[in-house]
Amino acid sequence: MTRTKPTPEGKIKTQVKRLLDKHGHFNFSPVMGTGKAGIPDIVVCTCSRFIGIEVKATAKNKPTKLQVRRAQEIRTGGGTVFLVHADNLAVFEEFAADPVLVDMTLLQFPEA
């Protein structure tokens, strides 16, 4: 059985999920091909907040127009959307450890 090497984005997703699990935050990755296209890679419910996390390999990788539209829909519904990548993973790690004290603007998904 041949294992495929994880993509750079896949490595970040794994790190994000490990941090969420380590700190006891409820999270799951939606199954692709079901539901709406463009939804975030990871869905989190913690501290009475709904958070969608879109993962990219680096800050150079930008969300698609559809991902930006879904992020706006989540914000309209009262949720938060983060864009996490290798360049801000340390900030996300602080958030996972203490979601109340971290400046979440460093993780915010770009506006449409």
Image: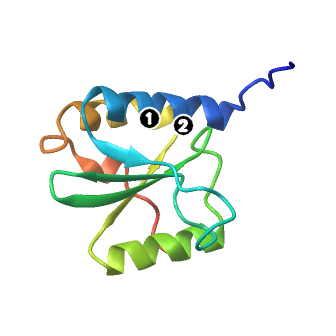
The three-letter code of the residue at mark 1 reads: Lys
Q: Is residue 64 above or below residue 77?
A: above
Q: Where does residue 2 sit, x and y in percent of width and height?
A: 86, 19
User: Quick one: label 1, few (<14), some, or many (20+) residues within 10 Å?
Assistant: some
Secondary structure beneath dot 1 equals helix
Q: Residue furthest front?
A: 1
Q: Is residue 64 left or right of residue 92?
A: right
The three-letter code of the residue at mark 2 reads: Lys
Q: Which numbered tag is attached to residue 112? A: none
Residue where numbered disc 1 is placed: 17
Name which residue lies at 59% across and 45% down: 56
Rendering quarter of residue 38: bottom right
Q: Nearer the viewer, residue 96 or 61?
A: 96
Q: Is residue 106 left or right of residue 1?
A: left
Q: Nearer the viewer, residue 104 or 28?
A: 28
What is the quadrant of the N terminus in the image? top right
Q: Where does residue 68 sit, x and y in percent of width and height?
A: 54, 70
User: Quick one: label 2, few (<14), some, or many (20+) residues within 10 Å?
Assistant: many
Residue where numbered disc 2 is placed: 13
Q: Is residue 3 above or below residue 91?
A: above
Q: Are marks 2 and 1 in contact (CB under 8 Å)?
A: yes
Q: Is residue 22 above or below residue 51?
A: above
Q: Nearer the viewer, residue 18 or 91?
A: 18
What colour scheme governs how the chains and residues are painted in the rendered image of this protein?
rainbow
Q: Where does residue 63 sit, x and y in percent of width and height?
A: 61, 60
